[in-house]
Image (cartoon, rainbow, N blue to C red):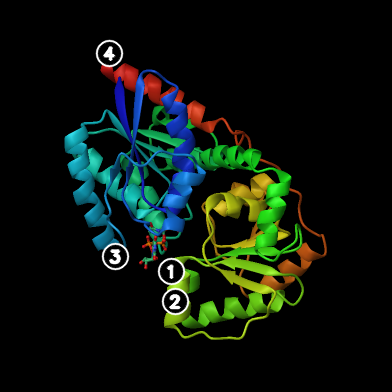
Amino acid sequence: MAKVLLVVGARPNFMKMAPLYFAMGKVPSLQPLIVHTGQHYDYVMSQAFFEDLELPQPHHFLGTGSGSHAEQTARIMIEFEKVLLAEKPDLIVVFGDVNSTVACSLTAKKLLVPVAHVEAGLRSFDETMPEEINRRVTDTISDLLFTPSPDGDENLLREGVAPRKIHRVGNIMIDSLIGILDRINQDHQEQIVQRFGLTKRNYVLVTLHRPANVDEREGLAQILTYLNGLAARVPVVFPVHPRTRKNIEAFGIEASFRDAFHIVEPVRYREFLTLQNNARFIVTDSGGIQEEATYLRLPCLTLRPNTERPITITEGTNELADMSNIEAQSARILAGQWKQGQVPALWDGHTAERIAQVIHDHTAFRKS
Ligand code: UD1
């Protein structure tokens, strides 16, 4: 039996881990255990996701919390090292690009524990994003690199990663999305949308939390002014991330927003997917939401100068936007002039099974 620690820490990790936990549970030779670093800790940012994904409580919860990058990364490393020494796993699996991803892969490698990275190979080529550093460091030291799309393979090969380590398996987030939406029927979706005072296909869904958008007063105020203006044409719902909420308060941005601009608390996973599934379009700076919108074939405006997920633009429904063109782009969408997009290859709901198979083969080989 190979013991495999699945390491998560922040909101976007949970839906990437869940399908793999269940797929590995069906492989008799694998024993998956969940480690939660506690990088995200609010109920709605963490526990609610475990509930919606029907996951058990984590086997280890490290309670490391927030802090500067160095503080947070260091605390996670110190606590995770204790788990590694106690559990002596055969492999750890890390997900995405958050601080927990890099902290735990570094810690494991120093103890000679192999690392698998799910969502490997993505690059924004923007070193001002902390996630770009996390991705590059994690990929450099990982033993198994699971990529969602061909650009991931190309980036890794260009950086000198051995081809035998790279496995293109598709997009694991889409496994979770398909599973949850299958479980929420249309009536229930209608109820959820109405709870926010909205009607299906007649609102814009917004998420913003990147430091580049929300950590400067002027930039954040400008975005909120645009959204308030948009709400004159179509209702807008904005579940606000804790980072963004804290900054709105700290900067004292007290505009009087239109009633049609619904600023709400962060929502749990199944509600968020329902809001996405029924929106007219999306404005975001998230990584994963660009992918979910592509799968749902929903127009998406990404308020960033670059994306590590270019396939969402070349094949999907996503476009980059900035404050100089976002009004024109929004108008085009509202006028029905947007690309249809297509769902990329292997974004089919079976990515977790493919990863579990590779992990089975890899751990069986190492143990033999
Ligand atoms: C992190 C990830 C980012 C991911 C995002 C999704 C890194 C470097 N960034 O950013 O890639 O897209 O999660 O949410 O790992 N806070 C709370 N409650 C919580 C969590 C955070 O109040 O449960 C507040 C804290 O004040 C904290 C701030 O939000 O200082 C930011 O949290 P942090 O984990 O540092 O980064 P995120 O902005 O959430």
Find numbered disc 3 in the image and state the secondary structure of the residue it sits on.
loop
The verdict on label 1 being within 8 Å of ligand 1 is: yes
Nearer the observer: mark 4 or 2; the answer is: 2
Badge 1 density bin: few <14, some 14–19, many ≥20, Cα 10 Å: some
Given the image, on which type of amino acid does mark 3 rest? Gly
Q: Please tell me which of labels 4 and 3 falls first in the chain.
A: 3
What's the CA distance linking mark 4 and mark 3? 43 Å
The residue under label 3 is 67
Which quadrant is the N terminus positioned in? top left
What's the CA distance linking mark 2 and mark 1? 6 Å
**Residue at 38% over, 60% down:** 130
What's the CA distance linking mark 1 and mark 4? 48 Å
Which quadrant is the C terminus positioned in? top left
The residue under label 4 is 368
Residue 214 position, x and y percent, is: 48, 73
Find numbered disc 4 in the image and state the secondary structure of the residue it sits on.
loop
